[in-house]
Amino acid sequence: MLWDIENHQIGLIVAVIWNPAMAERFPKERHQECRVDLRTGQCHGWHCNRCGAPTDAQGGHYCPDRPQAG
């Protein structure tokens, strides 16, 4: 969950650290712009929990599977 500073409440989870469950859901993810361990090739970056795309910890990207605010 993310803390919404303006409204002083808990918000929705929009990004998670790449994990085995994400790898199973999104097997074709290329991990461009991800933080990857060069020794193992394993991604340690944040990804959108809806579309699997690389993102920041706040979910900052255009997700085709998530309604946009505004």
Image (cartoon, rainbow, N blue to C red):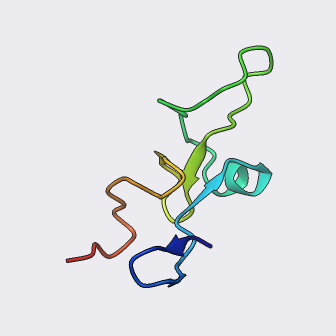
Name the residue: 49% across, 47% down: 56
Q: Residue furthest top?
A: 39
The quadrant the C terminus occupies is bottom left
Q: Quadrant of the N terminus?
A: bottom right
Image height of 69 relative to 21, above or below = below
Q: Quadrant of residue 49?
A: bottom right
Between 9 and 52, the residue placed more toward the observer is: 9
35 and 6: which one is in front?
6
The residue most toward the left is 70
Q: Quadrant of residue 28?
A: top right
Q: Is residue 69 left or right of residue 47?
A: left
Residue 47, given in percent of the width and then of the height, sits at 56, 50
Residue occupying the point 46% across, 58% down:
59
Q: Position of residue 48 (x, y in %)?
A: 52, 57
Horizontal and vertical percent for residue 57?
Answer: 54, 52
Taking the spot 32% from the left edge, 76% from the top edge, the residue there is 67
